[in-house]
Structures are given as structure tokens and as C-alpha cells.
Image (tube, helix red, strand yellow):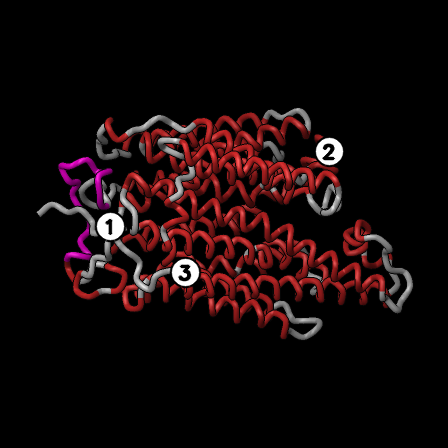
Amino acid sequence: MPAADSTDGAPDGIPAGPAGTAPGAAVSAKDPTASGTARPAGRPPTPVVVSLMLGMALVALDSTIVATAVPQIVGDLGGFSVFSWLFSGYLLAVTVTLPVYGKLSDTFGRKPVLLFGIALFLLGSLLCASAWNMAALIAFRIVQGLGGGALQGTVQTLAADLYPLAERPRIQARMSSVWATSAVAGPTLGGLLASYAHWRWIFLINLPLAALALWMTTRHLTEPVRSPGRRGPVDWAGALGVFCCGGLLLFALVQGGVAWPWLSAPSLGLLGASAVLAAVVVRVERRAEEPILPGWVWRRRTIAAVNLAMGALGLLMVAPMVFMPTYAQSVLGLGPVGAGLVMSVMTLSWPVTAALSQHVYRRIGFRDSAAVGIALAAAVLCSFTLLPYPARPWQPALIMLLLGAALGLFQLPLIVGVQSTVGWAERGTTTASVLFCRQVGQSVGAALLAAVANATIAARLADAPVPGLPRHLDDVAEALEHPELLPRTAADHLREAVAAAVEHIFLGATAAAVAALVVLLLLAPRRFPVLPELRDN
């Protein structure tokens, strides 16, 4: 990697002064993939920014709007035992395709990959709205996920392509605000559509948004012309291997401990098969001329450190996103709306500190800014264990607000920083690897922390001094939904067991945050090797 550009002595090679804050940059006459960070001259036009935000909104809204309509979907189509695959199937498709789309965007350009992703997402939404049973709906959700993988990675890459380093926090903060708005609006909109219209409208509402994003991207997005000589053969064997290996591993993590025990033959067989496939993928990728997962992603200290840190972020995010609503309803006695509000306050502070983080990393650098953010996040996560029992609703809500502020300071400097260390021809692959690691971390975290929760609750039930408690973990959910059917002492003991389980989960999330901090301090360079941006004189 080239050495950091030490313009004006700024940390991480971030240009300071008038040159660093110029609104745009012109494209060099050379091939933009040769070096540096090439992009169209000037700030991108508003329609391009709107199209990127629409593309991100499709992915962000879809991840939250479906959850509130599950009762209506199951009531109409059946399939209660497999409805969780509405989410797991979508997550699998998004995760395993991220590296593939990242490499394809580096090979063929961002625009064709983005258009393909929007079109496929639109098709998947239309198919979901026409599903006739749960199996068909799950299959069509996977089609949606195949499009969502292209949208999620390519939009983030384009944000770095189109904006100079000095202005990337602005577009990244806008992207964060899209996720924040979707986190709050998605469940409400899904509930309204399912209650007063029909659950199929939660997919039909994507059609005009996707069509508008498709039209605006086609009409307004212009990329620099690339030299055909830079394109090598597409590594389709590697793409298929990554897809199969990732899909098998994530399938094992999603189903393990739910559909079958962790040490059962299905779990061990799937994990073993994914390990064999991983070895095959490594062998194939080493021989490929243009590998989907190139070795330099892990050989470069900066990218490897960011990937590991973002994997830890995905793991720790399981605690507030998955288990905080359960805690709010089962322990605090709040309704679904109140529980959602306790969790969603995190999304209010996240984009604010993300937007302000540029003032921090301009002074102390990308790595140290992220280290401060994740250290604060570890302290906030650990403070959850100090809450009284029972806590008042404002107390966990305050923790979520502070956690969002800390993670906004952690995530955005890493994304902006790592994207600035590579040129155009490597940025799609780099961005996809970061998002892929975060998604895998989330899947691993869901499996690990669910195992921690189950073990804690099972131990509390086994040692319970009161009668009337459910004997099996499978009966706990029903008991929590109808605590009035239990003796009062049994219901109180069950709530205490859930509170203890969530405390252990937050301790696990704290450990993940500490691991991310250690990775940054030991592996990441103190100054990211930022490439100088190409500018016309």
C-alpha cells in the first residue's frame, strides 16, 4: 500500500485546509483504476444522491417492515413452524452475495451492478406480493435478498466514489439517517398496512420506490469510462464457491440450537461441510486470475483490522436489536410499541455522532476515533448489568441512546477510512468485505448469544424454588406471552430468569466490543495509509 499522504500534517493523510474541503474533484485523464480515488468532477447532482438514498431505503425498510406483519402472513398462508425463514433466507442471500457483487462492481462498474440489484429487488417484491403459500414467499424473499446484496454494497461503494474524502461523512450520515428512519417507520408502516390494508402491500409499496430508483439511476448516474484492458475474466467458480460455502455456514448458524441441537449430526455435518468447502474456495481463489475474494483483503493490515472490528460490531449488535425488545416486554411489561421505542432510540443518536465524527478523526485519526467509540460502547453495554430489577423504562432507553452515540463514532470512521486506502478498482471488493464480515458477525452473534440465553434460562428453571414454571425451553415463549396463566411467584421467577439471561448477553456483547478495541489497537496502523485523491490542477 502507498504511504499516507501527509498533507499539512493531518492525521491519516486527510487533506486539511482549502484543498481538502473543495466540493469536488476532476477525473484524471488516465485510467481511473490505475491509482488514486477517481470520480466525476464536482459534487454529484441531487438526483444521484436521491437515487442512492432510495436504494438504501429499499434495503433498510425491508428489514423492519415485514416483522410486524408476520401474524397476518401466517394467518393467511400458514407455515408457522418455518416463518422465521422469511428473515433468515433474506439474510443468507444478502450476506453470501456481498463479496460477489463487490468484485463484479470493480470489474464492470458500479452502475450496472446497482441497476441489476434494483431490478432484481423489484422482481422479488412483486413475486412476494403474489406468493400463494409460505414456501413460495420464502423463496421469493431469497430473490429479494439476492437484489438486496447488490444494493447494500454498491450504494456504500458509490458514496465513496462520488464524494471526496472531506465530504464523505455527509453522505454516510445521510445513509445512517435512512437506516434510523426505517427502524422507526418500518414497524409502524408494516403494522398499519397489515391491519388496515393487506400484508401484500408491504411488498407492493417497494414497487414505486424501486421503479423511481431505477429510473433516476439510469438517467442521472454517470461513471468514469474505464479501460477495457483492466478487466480480467470473471471468477465464476469462485463466486459459486463463496455463495455455497457462505450459505452452508450461515444455514448451520441460523438453524443450530433452533431446529436441532448444536452437537447433533445435522449441525456437525453442516459445519464440517462448510469447512471443506472453505478449503476448496481458498484453493480455487489462489489459482484464479481475478479472484472474488482476493488474498490482499486479509494481507493488508488496515483492511483486515477493519473487517475483524466490523465482525465484532455485528456480533454485539445482536444484544440491543434482538434481545432488548424481549427484555422490554417480558421484564419491564411494555407493549410491542413501547419495546420498539426503547430499542429505536439508539437509531436517533447514531447518525448524529456519525455526522460529527469527522471533527474527531480529523484531529486524532480514523483508528483512534473508532477506538474511542468502541471503548465507550463497551462501557455502555457493561452498564446494562448495573440496572436495578425491575428497571424503569427510561433507564434501558438511556443506555440505547448512549450506545447509538458511541457506535456512530466507531463505525463511520472505519468505513470512510478503509475506503480511502484503496483505489477505484479495489473499493467495491473492500467495501463488500467489510459489510460481509459485519453480516457474518451478526449471524455468529445470534447463534452464540442465543445459546448463552438458553443456557441461563435453563439453569434458572432447573434450580427454581417455585412450582408452576415451564419444564422445557420451548414452552418459555408461550409462558412469557401469557404470564397471567402462571402462579405469581412462578411468573416473577421467570422474569428474573429472562433479566439474568439478557444481562449475560450484554456481557457477551461487552466482550465483543473489547475484542474490537484490542484488534484496532494491536492490528490497525495508527495512521491509515490514505491514498491521495486525483485532482486536476
SS at mark 2? loop
Q: Is residue 453 left or right of residue 62?
A: right
Q: In the image, is residue 111 part of the stretch drawn in magenta?
A: no
Q: What residue lies at 42% left-to-right and 39% top-to-bottom?
A: 293
Residue behind mark 1: 164
Question: Which residue matches tag 3?
Answer: 523
The stretch in magenta equals 19-36
Q: Does the rendering let one see residue 431? A: yes
- CA separation in Å, label 2 and label 3: 47 Å
The amino acid type found where label 3 is placed reads: Leu
User: What distance separates the C-alpha of mark 1 from that of mark 3?
Assistant: 27 Å
Residue beneath the point at 35% across and 63% down: 357
| Circle 2 residues within 10 Å: few <14, some 14–19, many ≥20 | some
Quadrant for residue 417, please give it: bottom left
The disc, 2 or 3, on the residue closer to the chain's N-terminal end is 2
Q: Which residue occupies 42% across, 42% down?
A: 432
x, y percent for residue 181: 47, 51
- Between 294 and 418, the residue placed more toward the observer is 294
Q: What residue did someone put label 2 on?
A: 79
Q: Is residue 159 left or right of residue 508?
A: left
